[in-house]
Amino acid sequence: MEFIQTAVAWFLGLGSTVIVPIVLILLGLIFRVGWQKAVRGGVTVGVGLAGLFLVVNLIIAALQPAVGALATRLGLELALVDVNWADAGIAWGWPGVAGLVLSIIAVNLIMVFLRLTKTLWTDVWSYWHGSALAGFVWALTGSVVWGVVGGVLYLVLGSLMSDVTAKKYQEFNEMPGIGVPCGTTVQASIFAIPVVWLLERIPGLKDWDASPEGIRKRFGLIGEPAILGLVLGVIIGIAAGYNVQGILGLGMQVATMMLVLPRMVSIISEGLVPITMSIIEFMRERFPDREIYVAVDCAVLLGHPAVMASSVILFPLSILLAAILPGVKMLPIASLAVVPFWAGAVVPYTKGNVVKTVIVLLLFSIPFMYFSTLTADIHTATFANMGQFTAEIEQGLQLASWDMGGDPLGFVILNIFKLFGF
């Protein structure tokens, strides 16, 4: 078992930009795409993901200090330490990770074979959300087995939610055959369905064309993605109290992101679509009554201009909302990095309407603010069990995050284990 644990940890340590191409190439060979097309497509997707993450990391690195400066100017300071994607250390480091990965692969294949799901969960990297929850369950129960059970349950439910959302993602992003089952991203879509239905019945708001195209028609030059990014960056820079140099620099960084990021997603699409289409054709020829969705990284949803326009607006608004909600104890600075991925999942349902997307995600963020506060004790205990953040924990600090600590589905599963006294 130790050998398997080491092998799985080594493979997962390659990161999504290596794992995703490898899996796509293997899929291409299994489904007889042709080795040249499979290799070309897999490597192209890896290049697109690497470029996309560079752009996303650039803008997050630029905006987090600005939002932090805004919070400081407003005198906002809450007790919990936001560690956000440091939770990946739990996901890939807790003792049962190898068992979790092998179990969900087996369970997913059985579900596909029995037609319980259409989603073939090939995005191994995104298992990390279920694995992080499994780590929480392990710390709560002291049992690796129960940790695996909790993590598999989480990932199974993600597959089922992917079945519900896949068609909308495919049509809006022009990526046939994909599914995105990962973590809080797909939960954002499920949340958006009833909220958007309600928003589309509010007089005035339902007819307001706040898509990037609508903004461009109404405001001309300001509606262009790069110019809109420049304006949003400048506004946040001013609110953060930056000097002229800092304001203009932030504006240009946001403008760069708005223009370059869709190009990276188009590169991903260029490599991904030929493989997924070949898999679809393979399935149609042999199983006319079957439909399979190929699970891909949630980053493929970031290409529409409304995604980042909504995200930039949401960054300062999320800070202000966290500050005014009673009982919330974490100021989401690091956790803001998850917002673009939520936006990517919601924009297909709002048809790119920035205002509706912002409203949906402000509402969606509220349970994350409370659940991240409520799970801080088990979150901190899990890191302590793994020997991580030792200095901070010894100082009496408690650790929290949105993406896993505030995850609504994870919160429910964790509390089921508490309810039954495991």
Image: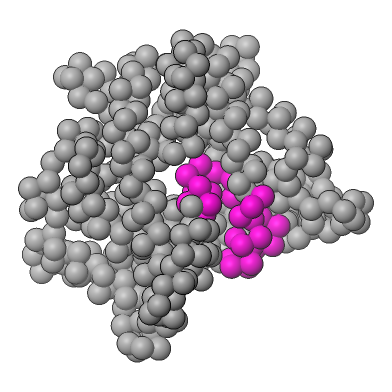
In the rendered view, would you say 57 is above or below 348?
above
Is residue 416 visible in this depiction of the protein?
yes
Q: Report the colour scheme.
A: one colour
Expressed as whole percent of the image width and height from the top left, the position of residue 170 reads 64, 62
Left or right of residue 250, residue 72 in this image? left
In the rendered view, would you say 111 is above or below 1?
below
Identify the residue at the far right of this view. Answer: 286
Left or right of residue 243, residue 277 in this image? right
Expressed as whole percent of the image width and height from the top left, the position of residue 175 reads 64, 63
Residue at 9% of width from left, 61% of height from top? 241
Residue at 14% of width from left, 55% of height from top? 70
Is residue 19 visible in this depiction of the protein?
no
Left or right of residue 381, residue 409 in this image? right
The span shown in magenta is 163-190
Expressed as whole percent of the image width and height from the top left, the position of residue 63 reads 25, 56
* In magenta segment, residue 70: no
Residue at 38% of width from left, 79% of height from top? 204
Q: Nearer the viewer, residue 254 or 112?
A: 112
Q: Split into 4 quadrants, where in the image is the N terminus?
A: top right
Left or right of residue 365, residue 331 in this image? left
Q: Nearer the viewer, residue 222 or 260?
A: 222
The image quarter containing residue 88 is: top left
* In magenta segment, residue 167: yes
